[in-house]
């Protein structure tokens, strides 16, 4: 069954059937529309999505680009990716659109693909500032960034109040009586999520009269296996730390395991605070105290931006969602 067959059964032209399928009802009488729709339903006809996208000049596809994922890497190694992607897909699906996921080593690699797929818009997750202008100049569809800082560019972006998150992390540990604190964090070379969290963290310590020495900063990427080694290094450092702050929950999980392997118990011997409030934080032992964000709220804010742009609203804006301390079991109060 194809469009011509339906037109023949209905006794109308192929153009008339096409108008019904594509919602151009003003060009078709109510009686003809009802007849065509009855035949479509009776024969369970499914229009070709690509053909419809060409006619309506829309694909109903929103791209999602996850950068800095190598050809042999699994983007799900970091649970954060899984949860934000799931939240975005749920939102996009609720708008009767489709989410097309692409992982790339460099964001520039994906631009020709997005253009060839005729996407109606694209999300970019955690892009470096130097890549923002390249993306915006190369694509002529709505673009919404997530967790991206671009001081020199005007962008549509949804992120967190990362500075406040870092500040709260330090203040919480200080409030629990900790003064000898280490920090496990990725390296940063320009503005971005980690830099903002780091600034907030060190400012809170400074307000309390505590200077974070460079020897108290342990570098690790956001990988569980890497964080295990750092947890071992901290446990065996002999520096008398009572607490360690992290910039992500996945690093906190690795630290706890690394310390456990060295006979250091969390929270009795060492306190750990995470960042993100992944659902896994509830399942881990001990349950992880962390700086919490709402994945659904972030996806809704980014999705609303995207569809505002698709609908022709072009006011550029940035949204930084609030964060809070989520208390569980991994931080001990020192009395």
Image (spheres, rainbow, N blue to C red):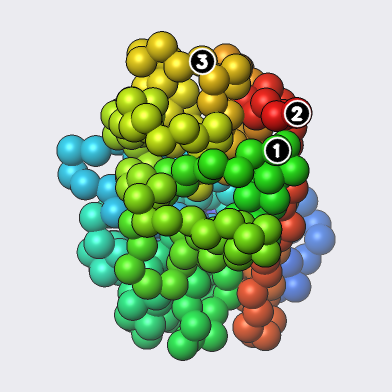
Residue to which mark 3 is pinned: 265
Residue to which mark 2 is pinned: 335
User: What label does residue 177 carry, if any?
Assistant: 1
Which element is circle 2 on?
loop
Which element is circle 3 on?
loop
Q: State the image coordinates of residue 65 (x, y, percent, origin top left).
A: 40, 56
Quadrant for residue 272, please give it. Answer: top right
> Taking the image as drawn, is residue 30 in sight?
yes
Quadrant for residue 77, please give it. Answer: top left
Q: In the displayed structure, does residue 100 sit left or right of residue 266?
A: left
Q: In the displayed structure, does residue 1 sit left or right of residue 218?
A: right
Vertical comparison of 106 with 286: above or below: below
Instruction: Tell me the residue at 37%/30% (across/down).
Output: 238
Which circle, 1 or 3, is nearer the viewer?
Answer: 1
Vertical comparison of 158 with 334: above or below: below
Q: State the image coordinates of residue 48 (x, y, percent, origin top left).
A: 45, 50
Which element is circle 1 on?
loop
Nearer the N terminus, badge 3 or badge 2? 3
């Amino acid at each position: 069954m194809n469009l011509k067959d339906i037109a023949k059964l209905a006794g109308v032209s192929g153009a008339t059937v096409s108008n019904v399928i594509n919602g151009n009802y003003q060009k078709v009488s109510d009686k003809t529309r009802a007849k065509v729709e009855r035949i479509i339903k009776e024969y369970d006809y499914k229009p070709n999505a690509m053909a419809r996208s060409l006619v309506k000049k829309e694909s109903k596809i929103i791209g999602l680009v996850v950068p800095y994922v190598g050809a042999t890497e699994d983007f799900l190694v970091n649970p954060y990716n899984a949860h934000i992607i799931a939240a975005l897909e749920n939102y996009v699906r609720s708008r009767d659109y489709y989410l097309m996921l692409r992982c790339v080593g460099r964001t520039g690699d994906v631009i020709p693909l997005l253009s060839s797929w005729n996407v109606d818009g694209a999300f970019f997750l955690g892009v470096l500032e130097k890549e923002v202008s390249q993306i915006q100049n190369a694509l002529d569809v709505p673009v919404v960034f997530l967790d991206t800082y671009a001081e020199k560019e005007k962008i549509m972006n949804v992120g967190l109040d990362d500075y406040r998150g870092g500040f709260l992390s330090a203040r919480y540990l200080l409030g629990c009586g900790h003064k000898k604190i280490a920090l496990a964090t990725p390296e940063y070379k320009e503005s971005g999520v980690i830099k903002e969290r780091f600034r907030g963290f060190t400012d809170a310590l400074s307000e309390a009269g505590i200077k974070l020495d460079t020897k108290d900063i342990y570098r690790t990427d956001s990988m569980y296996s890497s964080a295990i080694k750092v947890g071992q290094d901290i446990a065996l450092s002999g520096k008398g730390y009572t607490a360690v702050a992290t910039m992500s929950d996945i690093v906190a999980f690795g630290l706890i395991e690394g310390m456990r392997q060295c006979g250091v118990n969390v929270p009795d011997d060492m306190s750990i605070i995470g960042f993100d409030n992944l659902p896994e934080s509830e399942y881990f032992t001990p349950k992880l105290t962390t700086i919490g964000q709402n994945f659904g709220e972030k996806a809704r804010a980014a999705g609303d931006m995207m569809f505002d742009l698709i609908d022709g609203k072009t006011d550029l804006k940035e949204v930084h969602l609030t964060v809070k301390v989520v208390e569980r079991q991994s931080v001990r109060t020192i009395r």
